[in-house]
């Protein structure tokens, strides 16, 4: 969790990813030019309110976008290979072996008519061939014990497991082939708070054991703070700020990040909620300029004209906001004031 | 674990017994609830026809006694149920010394055989086409062609039978017009005879397949679309399994379950359709027996054959219901 | 990526060509309703056409010709020669006549509405009973639900035709309405099951729960909140039931167990088969009623499929 520069090789690069959903009134720009890198061994958190495109980004990386959605433009480079240009056959061979998913809706993510072990088995055999059948039971039992599941789960059907157990089974499945990248898509959202923490700890433990790179998608800032190395904040299909987790919580730059972090409830004091819910503009037809202009307390004239570029304000901390243009010096203090001042 | 719980078993058994009882009661009650006295009217009709039947008096006497028309209704009803429980349907009026059971015994194997073949083909073909319609990897051309085949769905099988018999048997003469095998051949287990039976059975079976496979294809399509939207399908795709494996292990395996239940529900309609097809083809099964019995007003035969068919259908539904929990691991939890 | 991009429509193109996109989802003008479904429209058109001819045909054609001996025997349709009798068709009997001198056109005009009548009577009764029992089972639950479920499971298992054959063979002379009533005995389980399962699903859904919390009575919840959502299902179920009833009626008629005094399509087929019309190559005799019934069933099927797509938007989307 120290400096990002320790591991400069990105395993996954997403370049200008655009995913649109076709509707009768025009395309919804669900993901509109997302750029980021995932470094070896790190965990990147992708946060934002529901509908901001974070899950769509994950599905885009996994190449699981289904109509009416489609990937319009961009690159997803996994260890240098562009997944978008890859033929279906090679993509299939690479799935799970390099890129695994811990799904969103754990309740229904397992095939109800297959035993848990069979669902782990099929992915192993699909990628390692029939030869892997030897000793596969021991291997699966070991995977189950790694995520803290008892051996009897081996013979059970999904409906016989609790929500937390199902999610652990999904984690066991995700690490079965020791992938390069795991994407955890709101993996704990459907669980109650206690189970959520336990599952999150399991994920953390497994991650550290395997040294796998991970993208964690969620909206629980509190949980994120404990789990990830860097955080990317998404708003209306765009990443507005990326920063190491400490920086993000101590000194968020983008007005939206500030509102988001302000909204994390605190036990110590009660404070009025500043954030209003929902994306205000029509997602089919975003206004020109900054995507956040309609809700931004500091909106300036130029924000309505041209979208702000990503500006590196500190090493590893980038923000898309005109307030931090290198030429303008006074803006910084100005924003910091507002964050604590309704 | 996919086991059959005692409660489930008892519930299904209850439904089986109730089915038989209610069908038998309806058959008994309605003719008696109708204005006039249909039973004596029927006996009257038979007396008027009795002139040319050799032992007419004996038959009519036995018939009257059998119905015990002078006994109070509850007594008649209990005796009727008692006869049915013992599979005692009496004797045919048209072929007097022959018992109804003998007639049924000769016709039933043909009906069951034809029905089984037709139904198995229909179920497999229909579900296969329904699945293929939704599968992503199906060529577009095939997806466009299948709906054309569905035009026949919901036609009465008897209409299909008439069309087929006219085109393939009468005009083209590719298939025989009537009967389960060539007249003059002796039933045996020789290859020739079996081939002959298949040759004769093709058109009747085709009539049933043609009008009912679409029902399964449409049902399967709907289920496949539902399954396609399930979360586990997304995970299955992310896993990089082969498309064919995903199709049968994840999609079809889950989509087929409601189809099996639907199968139990439509069996009654299927049997009825088959009876009519047999009658059009003069197939040597229950349909032809029933038709001849209607022509000769052979009431014991009508009652016996119908009842046996109702019993068979209920039995088949019972068996399907008992097999179903083995297919769906969730069942013992949901239905208890 | 460029190629895939250009092959799909840009946002602007989508706005310019709404007609093409309309089918997929959402609605944005009053013509864009799921009820304007092509299958539904074609089906309704077919059935309306048959009904129209059935109802108004008798104003233009002497339907007394449907009775025995009113016309020459075994006359083929116009432009056709009877291969056995060498008779040639005339315009006096454009669709020909049958064995006992009945005019085929008159038979068709009188027969078609009779079939619909049976379907409508049986399906209406089945539907009413089904709505009552389905709502009772879904709302009251418990013992009531158990009993209704068992009885609908039982009734659905019975091959209705078999029971009807036995009853009709005893009753013999019956009229159209009695036959429809008997068929209705077996027409209630499927609407009952459908409504029960829909009520159970909707009862748990958010908006019905909200209505309950706001103190609405059970009755008003049933008719204000649940009924409107059930309408496409009810229509589909009604059509399915009517189809089933007509099917049963045709089955009985072709076995010679239908009404004897009124002309029916199934009854015409029965006489044709019984008089070896197939072997005598009098195809018009069995062919016309068969064809008319086939068109009728295809029309009903199309309506049913259309209603299915109205009720279930998912089917619509993937049928594009």
Image (spheres, rainbow, N blue to C red):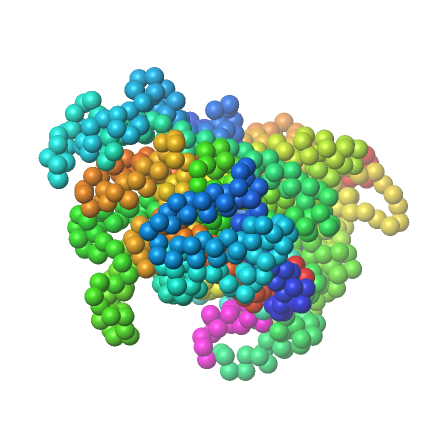
Instruction: Tell me residue C242's x, y (percent).
Output: 47, 37
Residue occupying image coordinates x 24% and y 73%: B191
Magenta span dominant secondary structure: helix
Residue occupying image coordinates x 69% and y 54%: A190
Instruction: Tell me residue A48's x, y (percent).
Output: 66, 46
The stretch of residues the image draws in magenta is A116-131
Residue C167 lies within the magenta run: no
Residue A123 lies within the magenta run: yes
Residue occupying image coordinates x 27% and y 65%: B197
Q: Residue furthest bottom?
A: A135
Asked if residue C193 can be seen in this view, the reply is yes
Residue occupying image coordinates x 67% and y 37%: A278
Asked if residue B145 can be seen in this view, the reply is no
Compared with C244, B18 (above or below) is below
Q: Where's the C terminus of chain B, which quadrant?
A: bottom right
For this rendering, which residue is in front, A208 or B318? B318
Query: Can you tell which quarter of the image residue A106 is in?
Result: bottom right
Q: Residue furthest top?
A: C59
Instruction: Tell me residue B155's x, y (percent).
Output: 37, 43
């Amino acid at each position: 969790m120290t400096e990002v520069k320790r591991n400069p090789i990105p395993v996954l690069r997403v370049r200008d990813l655009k995913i649109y959903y076709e509707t009768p009134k025009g395309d919804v720009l669900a993901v509109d030019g997302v750029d980021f890198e995932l470094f070896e061994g790190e965990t990147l958190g992708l946060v934002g309110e529901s509908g901001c495109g974070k899950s769509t980004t994950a599905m885009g990386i996994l190449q699981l976008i289904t109509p009416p959605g489609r990937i319009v433009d961009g690159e997803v480079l996994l260890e240098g290979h562009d997944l978008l240009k890859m033929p279906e056959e090679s993509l299939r061979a690479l799935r799970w072996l390099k890129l695994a998913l811990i799904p969103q809706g754990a309740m229904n993510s397992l095939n109800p008519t297959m035993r848990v072990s069979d669902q782990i088995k099929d992915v192993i055999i699909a990628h390692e061939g029939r030869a892997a059948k030897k000793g596969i039971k021991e291997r699966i039992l070991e995977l189950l014990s790694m995520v803290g599941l008892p051996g009897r789960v081996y013979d059970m059907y999904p409906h016989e497991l609790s929500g937390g157990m199902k999610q652990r089974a999904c984690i066991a499945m995700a690490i079965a082939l020791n992938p390069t990248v795991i994407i955890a898509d709101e993996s704990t959202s459907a669980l109650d708070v206690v189970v959520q923490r336990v599952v999150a700890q399991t994920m953390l433990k497994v991650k550290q054991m395997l040294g796998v790179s991970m993208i964690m998608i969620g909206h629980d800032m509190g949980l994120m703070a404990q789990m990830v190395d860097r955080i990317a904040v998404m708003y209306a299909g765009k990443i507005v700020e990326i920063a190491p987790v400490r920086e993000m919580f101590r000194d968020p730059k983008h007005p939206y990040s500030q509102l988001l972090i302000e909204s994390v409830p605190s036990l110590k004091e009660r404070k009025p909620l500043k954030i209003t819910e929902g994306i205000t503009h029509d997602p089919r037809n975003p206004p020109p300029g900054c995507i956040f202009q309609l809700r931004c307390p500091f909106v300036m004239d130029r924000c309505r004209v041209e979208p702000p570029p990503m500006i590196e304000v500190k090493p590893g901390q980038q923000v898309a906001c005109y307030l931090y243009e290198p030429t303008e010096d006074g803006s910084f203090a100005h924003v910091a004031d507002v964050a604590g001042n309704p | 674990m996919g086991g059959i719980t005692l409660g489930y078993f008892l519930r299904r058994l209850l439904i089986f017994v109730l089915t038989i009882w209610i069908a038998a009661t309806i058959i008994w009650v309605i003719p008696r609830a109708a204005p006039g006295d249909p039973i004596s009217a029927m006996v009257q009709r038979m007396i008027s026809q009795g002139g040319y039947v050799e032992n007419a008096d004996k038959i009519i006497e036995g018939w009257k006694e059998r119905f015990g028309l002078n006994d109070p209704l509850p007594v008649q009803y209990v005796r009727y149920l008692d006869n049915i429980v013992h599979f005692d349907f009496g004797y045919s009026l048209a072929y007097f010394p022959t018992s109804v059971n003998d007639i049924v015994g000769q016709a039933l194997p043909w009906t069951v055989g034809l029905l089984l073949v037709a139904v198995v083909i229909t179920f497999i073909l229909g579900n296969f086409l329904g699945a293929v319609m939704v599968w992503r990897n199906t060529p577009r051309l095939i997806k466009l062609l299948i709906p054309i085949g569905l035009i026949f769905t919901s036609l009465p099988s008897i209409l299909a039978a008439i069309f087929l018999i006219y085109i393939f048997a009468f005009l083209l003469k590719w298939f025989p017009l009537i009967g389960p095998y060539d007249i003059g051949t002796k039933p045996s287990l020789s290859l020739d005879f079996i081939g002959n039976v298949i040759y004769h059975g093709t058109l009747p079976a085709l009539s049933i397949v043609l009008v009912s496979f679409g029902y399964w294809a449409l049902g399967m399509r709907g289920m496949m679309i539902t399954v396609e939207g399930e979360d586990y399908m997304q995970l299955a795709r992310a896993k990089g399994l082969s498309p064919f494996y995903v199709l049968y292990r994840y999609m079809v395996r889950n989509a087929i379950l409601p189809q099996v239940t639907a199968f139990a529900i439509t069996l009654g309609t299927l049997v009825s359709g088959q009876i009519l097809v047999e009658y059009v083809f003069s197939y040597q099964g229950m349909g032809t027996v029933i038709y001849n019995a209607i022509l000769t007003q052979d009431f014991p035969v009508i009652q016996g054959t119908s009842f046996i068919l109702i019993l068979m259908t209920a039995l088949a539904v019972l068996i399907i219901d008992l097999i179903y929990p083995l297919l769906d691991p969730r069942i013992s939890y949901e239905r208890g | 990526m460029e190629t895939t991009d250009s092959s799909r429509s840009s946002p602007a193109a989508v706005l310019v060509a709404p007609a093409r996109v309309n089918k997929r989802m959402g609605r944005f003008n009053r013509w864009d309703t799921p009820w304007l479904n092509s299958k539904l429209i074609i089906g309704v058109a077919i059935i309306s056409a048959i009904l129209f001819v059935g109802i108004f045909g008798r104003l233009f054609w002497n339907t007394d010709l449907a009775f025995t001996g009113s016309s020459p025997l075994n006359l083929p349709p116009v432009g056709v020669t009877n291969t056995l009798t060498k008779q040639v068709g005339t315009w006096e009997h454009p669709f020909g006549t049958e064995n006992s001198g009945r005019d085929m056109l008159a038979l068709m005009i009188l027969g078609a509405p009779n079939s619909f009548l049976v379907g409508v009577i049986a399906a209406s009764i089945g539907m009413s009973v089904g709505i009552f029992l389905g709502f009772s089972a879904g709302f009251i639950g418990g013992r009531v639900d158990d009993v209704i479920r068992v009885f609908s499971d039982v009734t659905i298992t019975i091959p209705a035709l078999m029971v009807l054959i036995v009853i009709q063979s005893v009753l013999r002379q019956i009229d159209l309405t009695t036959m429809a009533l008997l068929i209705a005995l077996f027409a209630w389980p499927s609407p009952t099951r459908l409504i029960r399962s829909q009520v159970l699903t909707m009862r748990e859904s958010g908006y019905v729960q909200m209505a309950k919390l706001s103190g609405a009575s059970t009755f008003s919840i049933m008719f204000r909140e649940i009924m409107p959502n059930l309408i496409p299902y009810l229509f589909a179920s009604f059509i399915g039931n009517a189809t089933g009833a007509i099917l049963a009626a045709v089955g009985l008629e072709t076995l010679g167990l239908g009404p004897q005094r009124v002309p029916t399509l199934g009854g015409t087929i029965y006489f044709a088969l019984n008089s070896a019309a197939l072997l005598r190559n009098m195809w018009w005799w069995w062919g016309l009623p068969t064809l008319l019934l086939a068109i009728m069933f295809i029309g009903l099927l199309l309506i049913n499929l259309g209603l299915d797509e109205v009720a279930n938007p998912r089917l619509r989307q993937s049928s594009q």
